[in-house]
Image (cartoon, rainbow, N blue to C red):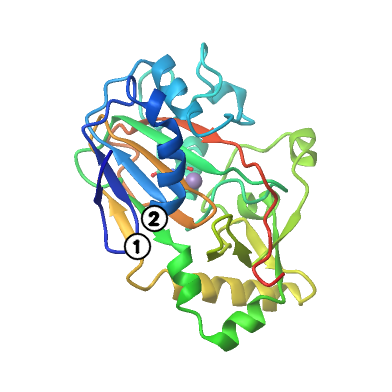
Amino acid sequence: MDLIPLHPSLGARVENFDCGRDPGALAEQLKTELPRWQVLLFRDQNLSDGAFVDFCRTFGTLELLPEPEKRHPEHPEIFNLSNVKPDGSLPHRDEPQAVFLRGTSRWHTDSSFREIPCLATVLYAITVPPVDGDTEFANMIAAHDALSPDDRAELERHRAVHSYAYSRSTNPGRLDPVDPEELAKVPDVTHPILRALPDGRRSVYLGTHASHIDGLPVEEGRARIRALEERLTAVDNIYRHAWRAGDVLIWDNRSTMHRLTGYAVDKHERVMRRCTVVGTDKVFPAGG
Ligand code: OGA
Ligand code: MN
């Protein structure tokens, strides 16, 4: 398997690879390369929806996301991440669908509000805007390693409260209300701020779902989290991906944060198929 680095800090492009045909014998190697590189890109893919799901299964069991209306009718594991409305038109900037997409423009790691957050997310680009709509990935292992010993010792003592209700409430704009029963299924959880990864490396685990620090006054913890995120994403540990139709890209949510950079949601179509690989473990603390 030929791997070409995408950026000095993280990410690799897998060359000469057909996601619809090649995984079989190479499945184990792909599973090893993902945590190593944190982001893997496969260009020029041409996959049926079923073949895309099969490829994603190489990395583990797939999640069914909570909003049934965004699921693919035949492959419920596929979430339709798109700004195109069912009638083919594009939303106004302030419509809930556009606001939801804008919410992903804040640094986050997917489903950190779960006790066992997802392991990885895969996007398959079907239609991309002619300009903008890139996605940035921050290497949170490098962010950890750049912390001073004092910061590490201090952060090792803390857990952050991750809350779906909090991140929704701070989304920039009005969203459709969530069914209280659905909300009750995702109670707040806490995770260590510094996490131990299976290979022994460590990462900083925060993002928009991180509301505050357990045991500290809410506003103080929140301010510290937001300041830390800002500091840790202002360094040279970010790969910015400019999408091309046919790109399949997978990222490891345990060791990266990501965000969508803006695009004109009311002007240009952006259609992605998304699958989410479930996590296998709770978040282990780095200090323990
Ligand atoms: C996601 C996400 C960003 C993007 O699907 O979890 O954050 O660029 N997407 O679409
Ligand atoms: Mn995301």
Q: Which residue is mark 1?
A: 238
Taking the image as shown, residue 80 lies to the left or right of residue 215, namely left
Mark 2 and mark 1: Cα distance apart in space: 5 Å
Residue at image position (62%, 51%) is 112
Q: Which residue is mark 2?
A: 137
**Amino acid on which disc 2 is placed:** Phe
Marks 2 and 1 close (CB-CB < 8 Å): yes
The kind of secondary structure element at disc 1 is strand
Residue 287 point in image, percent of width and height: 68, 72
Mark 1 C-beta closer than 8 Å to ligand 1? no
Decide which of 14, 229 is in the foreground and name it.
14
The kind of secondary structure element at disc 2 is strand
The answer to which of marks 2 and 1 sits earlier in the sequence is 2
Residue at image position (27%, 21%) is 46
Name the residue at the bottom extreme.
150
Few, some or many residues within 10 Å of mark 1 (<14, 14–19, 20+): many
